[in-house]
Every structure is written in C-alpha cells, then in structure tokens.
C-alpha cells in the first residue's frame, strides 16, 4: 500500500450474517415507510389545494352577491317631523 492511501474501514467482517439480514430487512421497511409518507404528503397537498380553491370560490361568490344587492339603493330616509309651537 502506498503511503498516501488510506485503508478502507468496513464493519462487514465484524457483522454476522444474521446482522446483515436484519439490516437489510430494516432498510426495506424504512423504504416502504418513506414511500407511504410521500404518498400521504402528495394527497395532503391535493386536499389543501382543493380546500383553498373552495374557500376562494365562496369568498368570490359572497363578494359578487353583495355587489349585486340593491336593497339600500332605493331606500329613502323618512322625513323628520318637528313639533314646534
């Protein structure tokens, strides 16, 4: 080995086959968990966007409905009656 090269440090010679088996099994379970979380996050994004669109639509409808209301446009103030003698 040359003086400028470092030796590789591996833990495999110290691990038994059962340890390696359990490590692979845990890694597989972790990958499945990550996949489920990604699916859940994407579904949550769609739900959030749908709810936001619904809120925006209700707000826009409310503003449009209030602008069309003409009840107070035709309202005349009653004449005041003064009782002076």
Image (cartoon, rainbow, N blue to C red):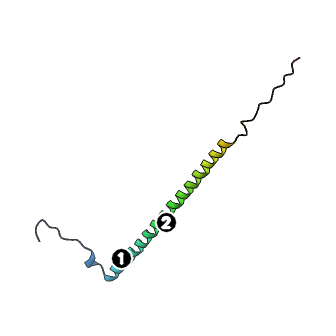
- Is 22 in front, or is 45? 45
> With respect to residue 5, does 12 lie above or below?
below
The disc placed on residue 57 is none
- Is 53 in front, or is 27? 53
- Image location of residue 12, percent across then percent down: 27, 77
- Is 43 in front, or is 73? 73
- Is 23 in front, or is 58? 58
At horizontal 42% and vertical 74% (from top left) the residue drawn is 29
At horizontal 30% and vertical 78% (from top left) the residue drawn is 15
At horizontal 45% and vertical 66% (from top left) the residue drawn is 38
Question: Tag count in the figure?
Answer: 2
Circle 2 residues within 10 Å: few <14, some 14–19, many ≥20? few
**In this rendering, position of residue 23 left or right of residue 50:** left
Per the image, label 2 sits on a secondary structure element best described as helix
The disc placed on residue 23 is 1
- Image location of residue 36, percent across then percent down: 46, 69
Q: Residue furthest right?
A: 85
C-alpha separation, residue under disc 1 versus residue under disc 2: 26 Å
For the C terminus, the quadrant is top right
For the N terminus, the quadrant is bottom left
**Residues tagged 1 and 2 counted as in contact (Cβ below 8 A):** no
**In this rendering, position of residue 83 left or right of residue 12:** right
- Image location of residue 53, percent across then percent down: 55, 54
> With respect to residue 47, does 83 lie above or below?
above
Name the residue that disc number 2 marks: 40
């Amino acid at each position: 080995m040359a003086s400028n090269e470092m030796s590789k440090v591996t833990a495999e010679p110290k691990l038994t086959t059962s340890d390696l088996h359990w490590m692979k099994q845990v890694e597989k379970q972790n990958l499945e968990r990550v996949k489920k979380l990604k699916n859940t996050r994407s579904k949550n994004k769609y739900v959030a966007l749908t709810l936001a669109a619904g809120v925006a639509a209700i707000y826009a409808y409310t503003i449009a409905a209030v602008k069309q209301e003409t009840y107070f446009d035709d309202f005349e103030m009653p004449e005041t009656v003064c009782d002076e003698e």
